[in-house]
Image: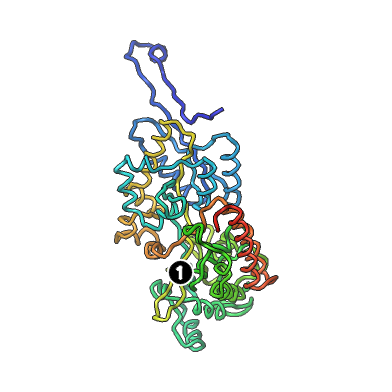
Amino acid sequence: MRHLSISVQLLGTAAVIAVLGVASAPVLAQEEVTLRIAVPDWPPTRIMKQLADEFYVAPSGKKVTLEPDFIPWPNFQDRLSASLTSGEQRYNMAVSDSQWLGQFVEGGYYKKLNDIIDADPELQAIFADLNPNLVDAYSTYPYKSDNFYGFPQMPDVLISYYRSDIFCDEGEAAAFEGEYGYALPCTPEDFGNSDWEMMRDFGEFFQRSAGEMLAGEELTDDFFGIAYQAGKGYDFSTMQINGFLWQNGAGIWDETNQPNAQTLGVVNSPDAVTAFEKYLSLLEYMPPVVKTGGMDIFKIDELFREGKVGWIMQWIGFAESAITPDISRVADTVAFARAPGTRKADGSLDRTANIGGQPFVLTTWNDEETEREAIDFVKWWLSKETQIRFAQAGGQSGLQSVYTSPEYGTYRPWNDAFGPSLDWQRDVWHVPEFMELLTQQQEEFDKAITGQVTAKEALDAIAVFQDELLRESDRIQ
């Protein structure tokens, strides 16, 4: 039986009189609506709940309460999938990874939004203001089509976090320039011009053992220059490797060109092998957990906050933890910049990267009243006023009118790196076969990361698997 999301409480005239002991005109209590939403448990969704409780007033006049189910990231996809497919109809909304759109759209769980958007000028204005890459990634299925299923909740990109106390140290800077022949970057502007060859130098230079000196202090633990995603779980290596592939002229299977897109000779092309080898070559400068397939986003966050790594490439959504003194030893010394890229012949940087972040989606079983309240909440969330509050609290806005404003960079020290990164973002597959493709690919990437196979052997195995699976699914001819 459907679990209704609306609770209506009416206080009749007789009850009012009994309580007050005096004659009174009829009084009706405010109608109450609860929007139940499945969300990953991390700062952007916690901030959303806080802002909703403090500021949201429903245009309908009803008392609307956002009731998030905060689910740990490692369990989120499994928990959401189990709920949607069980028939329990627990959630009115979800904050869903964009990669799950195909699976849950074709399963009949996510509502198509085109008619709602077409009938609502406010929503049309919001979509016109959003960065187009966010619309493609968070709203469309098939990817980059005109079929809309989501609204951006938290845009996320990979950026550089670095230790200003060591990169700006005069002694370290002098030693580095003497060894490598160019200046060690210090400011976010300088650091934002870094390429992957420079990251290799940083990794090599700052790799120190306990007892050695770093920025004038003796180390009590081993120290490592760099770290980025190389984890076996979920998508923790894929999100990093895709950027290397795209920046070096290679690619993944292109779902937008079905049924003519191929995997054989594409996923394992010579350019792809070269790009993957480049990715693997930098792992030697990272903490030893990388050799076990454990370098996921949570471990990177932990190692950096503990002061054991000089530079990391990490999602912007984790940046708040890095500047929080109670949990970060480097809170006073961390700085942020755009992520490095691959240097082209003309000297420019290709910064293409896999987008992170998530959209809101509506489930298909909401009644008309609940759906209207959910849409009104989304419109409030994506209003300029709310998006500014979200950014001021540590979140990010995909509205161009917000993130391009002069004030945006003052809200958080990483915000200047956010807007310019959006134009470089692409997304991984949206098709229902996403989890099968991802799981096998992660296994093969992990074999290469841990030294069991070569880059070419891993990519060959991935290409063959994807070719077979996508042909069985009629996505390749």
| Snapshot quadrant of residue 400 | bottom left
Q: Position of residue 8 (x, y in %)?
A: 44, 24
Q: Position of residue 194 (x, y in %)?
A: 45, 76
Closer to the camera in the image, 141 or 219? 141
| Residue 305 appears in the picture as rendered | no
- Depicted 211 relative to depicted 255: above or below: below
Q: Quadrant of the C terminus?
A: bottom right
| Snapshot quadrant of residue 338 | bottom left
Closer to the camera in the image, 408 or 200? 200
| Residue at x-position 49% and y-position 42% | 110
- Depicted 391 relative to depicted 58: above or below: below
Closer to the camera in the image, 213 or 460? 460
| Color style of the picture | rainbow
Total count of labels: 1
| Residue at x-position 62% and y-position 66% | 445
- Image position of 384 (left or right of 360): left
Tell me the SS state at disc 1. loop
| Residue at x-position 49% and y-position 83% | 171
Q: Quadrant of the N terminus?
A: top right
Q: Amino acid at mark 1?
A: Ala
| Snapshot quadrant of residue 132 | bottom left
- Badge 1 is on which residue? 339
